Amino acid sequence: MQRIPQHGVLTAGALAAALAPSADALAAQAAATQPARAKTEQGAPNVIWILLDDVGFGASSVFGGLVETPNLDALAKQGLRYTNFHTTAISSPTRAALLTGRNHHSVGLGLFPETANDQPGYSARIPASKATVAEILKESGYSTYAVGKWHLAPVEEAGPKGPFNRWPTGKGFEQYYGFLYGETDQWHPQLVEGTRALDDDPQGRHLNELLTDKAISYIDQQKKPFFLYFAPGATHAPHQVSKQWIEKYKGKFDAGWDSYRAQVFANQKKLGLIPQQTVLPARHPNVKAWAALSAKERRLYARYFETYAGFLSYTDAEIGRLVNHLKQTGQFDNTIIAVVIGDNGASKEGTDSGTTNGLAAVLYPENDIDKQLANIDKIGTEYSSPNYPLGWAQATNVPFRQWKQDANSEGGTRNPLILSYPRGIQDKGGIRAQYGHVIDLLPTTLELSHITPPAQVGGVKQDNIEGTSLAYSVSDAQAPSRHLTQYYEINGTRSIYHDGWKAATLHKPGTAFEKDVWELYNLKDDPTEINDLAAKNPDRLKTLQALFDSEGKKYNVFPLKDTLFQDFARNRSIYRDQDHIELTPDIGHLFSLTAPALNGPYYRLTVDVEIPASGAEGVLVANGGRFGGSSIFIQNGKLHYAQTNGYESALVSSEQPLKPGKSQVTVQFAPGLWSGAEVQLFQDDKLIGKGKAPVKYGVAYLSYDEGFDIGRDLRTPVSDKYKTPYAFTGKLEKVTIDYKAPLVDRVVANVNQRVLKTLVTFKK
């Protein structure tokens, strides 16, 4: 792709000298009939995009928060802070919009890959006609790298055989190292390099460190301008970090979330990040006053936030390590760095009282404060999967109301942006209030890099980029906003912004969309959405509602869907339509969602083994880990079935040792309607043990963070009876899984599915 000069405010003085088009570029421009070449101008800037996860507007010190982020502070002091920048309110949609410069429904990510359907706006299949920033820059001669969270691959395409065209390396990234889905254990991450699932043991190293090391190694490999997409799992749950970072904040949040909100709000006004007339919204009715909490609750909840704060500060330190490497290698001044602090507002998913058991809280909310306190020293370690209570989500979203998932509110959608480019930004430490959205970052980057959006990428004609470049604002703090209209929609909750006004509705899943109550706000005068003007301005409200409808039709938002949680509960395994599955040990590590389902349906799992006369031990099949999973293993000569949901565990063992030689060992799992699952163990069809395992609403456990293995148990152990990987020492030939249940079990499964769908609708 040829590069052409952009004549504007950015090409003055030293910047013009640095970025003036080369003779080769001018010659290519003159020879319009010749194909574009993948060649960059001498002095073309490097580009780094950093996207943090689940960070509220008022968390980091760079935006007035009480969590120290000195490296982000330093980037902002020699760059710009954008205070009116927006995301989509949730993970995958934000990432898809960011990387493509198009609205999330426009590229098929109206929700998650885990909830995809055949509707164009929700298919989770980014069209080739809407190329990513990596594809564009690669054609322009850049090296392209990604590390960290992806969360854009359809579940049925995440198996070991692909297809891989929607993995990072299929979307323009020459190198990728990270994790494919929404979250992963920070101490025992599920890692992929390229298209290969890794077995690597981090040996006690944190995911942040691994990602930064890999990013630096990629940078050191390149001999031309590079684009790096750096997307750590931080600070999405689980909040895990070393003790030294947690101890850094010991006692610093004992005053609680109400005090935090007041202090940060004052800081933000002092720093000029919000207008002086801004009003702080009242505490949410679902959040208790800190003073009304018991001493036990205050102690526990403070520790949750000390851990989160340490996690965010450590992430900032790793960003600093990356930036320092650029400085040491002389690349910093000519690198555009954009940091989006959060892919949505702060997370409300930690429940009212927090959790140490991650997704297990969906089935078993942890309301027992004494039980949580008993594990307080484990919070942040590999023996916990924590998320903070709701009160801290509101606190770190200061000054806005609501939080992640709520596309109607600034608390769900407004996130800070830092733009650093020492060679191209003169107003060091400037603040910008122009309206922006994640779809704007791609055209901004192209304009600052002097790259024209290509007409074709990979031979495919490109649809228009839907974002608006923010480059006009870099040298003019007072320039009027150019991005005037933006819709938002997540799981039926929706809003529409136009030129300072906003109409919005918070939808309750399961209710009729036409009955939703809309609100109206003048964000220029009321940025925190305190004064609903719908009753006073019905005509303006109707006009904005009509605008939402037209934008929704334009970008594939319709038909609306509000079934996020039911869709998440569906079986999307690549084996989901098979009643009979045969697997061999060479299949490698499978991601839990793509693997055969072992967490709820009836199944009969048989392993063909050969046990030496001297005996054998180890895991035959494992799915999930410490915070949700099941494992079939041999130990002390006996066959065992272990299961945990993160809250309670079960162990069913054979009554006598297994016979040596070739045989088939079998586990039959039959969930009951009210009384858990009946588990039976067999060798060569002879019953050798039985017992029960817990099941709730048809679900035995949630194993999202960990995967499926044959002949071993990678990551964390399902059972404390062994240490991972506990590889099987006998011979394992194959695993067979049969799902065709007896009639009574099919009836039970159907009832459980109905109960589960009702539950998730009611809970949300």
Image: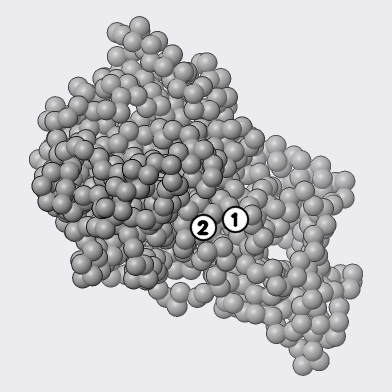
- Per the image, label 2 sits on a secondary structure element best described as helix
The picture places residue 15, in percent across and down from the top left corner, at 16, 49
Indicate the position of residue 332 as horizontal and vertical percent values.
21, 61
| Residue 444 coordinates in the image, percent (x, y) | 30, 41
183 left or right, relative to 482: right
Decide: is 752 above or below 17: above
Mark 2, other Cα within 10 Å: few <14 / some 14–19 / many ≥20: many
Residue drawn at x 18%, y 54% as measured from the top left:
18
The reply to whether dot 2 and dot 1 touch (C-beta < 8 Å) is yes
Question: Which residue: 29% across, 14% down?
Answer: 533
Position of 202 compared to 707: left or right?
left
| Kind of residue sitting beneath label 1 | Phe
Q: Which of 101/324 is in front? A: 101
Q: Residue furthest bottom?
A: 614
The residue at the point 46 percent across, 57 percent down is 173
Q: Which residue is mark 2?
A: 169
How many marks on residues?
Answer: 2
Label 1 Cα crowd, 10 Å radius (few <14 / some 14-19 / many 20+): some
Amino acid type, mark 2: Thr
Residue 79 vertical position relative to residue 497 in the rendered view, above or below: below
